[in-house]
Amino acid sequence: MVRFARLPSRLLRYGLVRSLFLRGLGAVYLIAFTSLERQVLGLYGRRGILPVSEFLERVRSAVGTERYREFPTLLWIDDSDRALLLHCKAGRFTALALLLDVAPRTSALILWTLYLSLVTVGQEFLAFQWDVLLLEAGLLGIIVAPPGVAPGIRGPPPSSMAVATMRWLVFRLYFESGLVKVRSRDATWRNLSACCYHYATQPLPNRVGWYAHHLPRRVQRLSTAAVLGLECVMPFLVLGPKRARRLAFWFLSGLQGAIALTGNYGFFNLLSFGLGVWLLDDDVVERLVGPAPRRRASSRAPRMPRTLFDILVGGSLLALSAATLARRFAIGRRLMRRLGPVARVLAKLDELTLPFHVVNSYGLFAVMTTRRPEIVVEGSNDGVRWREYVFRYKPGDLSDPPRQAAPHQPRLDWQMWFAALGPPPDWFTAFLIRLLEGAPEVLALLKENPFDEPPRYVRALLYEYRVTSAEVKRQTGDWWERELLGVYVPPVALSRRRSPPWGPTS
């Protein structure tokens, strides 16, 4: 097998790293757009739960001419169902181009623009941390991507500023995740019992997570301590010398692997792993993926205008994100007040870039949920006999095993978990209305619709779900047991229909 040509280290050091990152970014975009295309009409179409056309009309009335800056989306041009599908299809096509190293800088720009357009109008269903992480990583991908149609590693190498910006994002992603857990003063993180609950109460458990829940309590406490250590201490190695960064890569990648193995978090784990490759250099990457074919490389150093661009843009992003992180600490807030004009400039820059998700805050599970309330939606034609709507991935039937969904993200199922933690959100009311109307795009989001025609009434009950013990699982085959907590939404009907003859509600 041909060995890689020995090129000047300044040119070669991060060429493979960049190529691997951009291909991984293309794969994540491909997953994101493919997953969303399957759901976009049910979530945002004209007969969906949160129609984009209605959202944009409300924005147009409230914001006026500022709407283009405050809500940047191509859907201002066309908000039809066809345009939504076109966004997803164009995203899939362009993601494949980036994955294959076709015009990476142009492809990355198109992908970021398309995904920003969807996130801008996405409301609750596109407000997950990995959605904004993809936008922030995608923006940096535009900056580091080489020019040309098929540049490979032959283009100008990524600048030191670009590499530093990527590593700083990795640091923030993990450190902020640990910081929110420590600062929340949540009892389960303080007494190291968080993992005793996590696998059973996480939004969409999978089968491995079900078994992980039954590990000995001592193992769960050690796992909790490991998570806190990896998220609070290990990120500082990201900013250290080469060997420290390599060590951080393996430990943080191991954390992502464990999360992916025991839960369903869409494309988050793959994206986090892809960002982590910036902790490596070409020598390590070549040993991991094998020697690359010999190809002639450019000996040209980056032109000065490009270097200045990297310094200005990268420096601005570093300063803006550092200020955002500093504000989480009292000493940081005092420092920002002392900076005076600089702080005001950064605050203005933050205000201008906020709609574009240039810099974001991260941190999941600051407070661990210790119980699992679940919403069960039912329909009826007489108000007496009720039949249950079955979701694709969230717990429902007690005998159905937890399913593997990732890297696909079923966004309705995810939001049902959040909805169960509080009073019914507006989108849930809209969801019930679509069930009463029998909207096919919304029904397609479900695994099973028990009615040939739309029911006369729908309601929602709230249950507490608990993981069965291994013994009960062997005896009954049930993965879950549940207890009725009460009515989440009482029976409702469309106004044009007569009131139901309410009898028993069970």
Image (cartoon, rainbow, N blue to C red):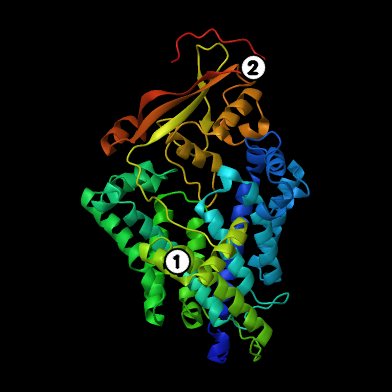
Seen in the picture, residue 46 relative to 266 is either above or below; the reply is above
- Rendered location of residue 369, percent (x, y): 35, 42
In the rendered image, which quarter is residue 370 located in? top left
Question: Circle 2 — which element?
Answer: loop
Pointer 2: residues within 10 angstroms few (<14), some, or many (20+)? few
Task: Say which element carries label 1.
Answer: helix
User: Is residue 475 or residue 220 the one in the foreground?
Assistant: 220
Residue 406 picture location, percent across and down = 50, 50
Extreme-left residue of the structure: 218
Q: Is residue 380 above or below residue 106?
A: above
Measure how far apart labels 2 and 1 are at the Cα level. 56 Å
Q: Amino acid at mark 2?
A: Ser
Q: Residue at x 73, y 74 (%)?
A: 149
Q: Quadrant of residue 292?
A: bottom right
Report the mark closest to the observer, 2 or 1: 1
The type of residue carrying mark 1 is Arg
Residue drawn where x is 41% and y is 73% of the image = 238
Dot 2 or dot 1: first in sequence order is: 1
Q: Name the residue that disc number 2 marks.
A: 495
- 371 lies left or right of 104: left
**Residue named by callout 1:** 337
> From what the image shows, is residue 401 above or below residue 223?
above
Where residue 223 sits: x, y (%)? 29, 56
Viewer-proximal residue among 108 and 162: 162
Q: Tell me where residue 260 appears, x and y as whole percent.
A: 43, 55
Residue 155 makes an appearance in the image: no
Q: Mark 2 touching mark 1, by CB under 8 A?
A: no
- 97 up-or-down from 84: above or below: below
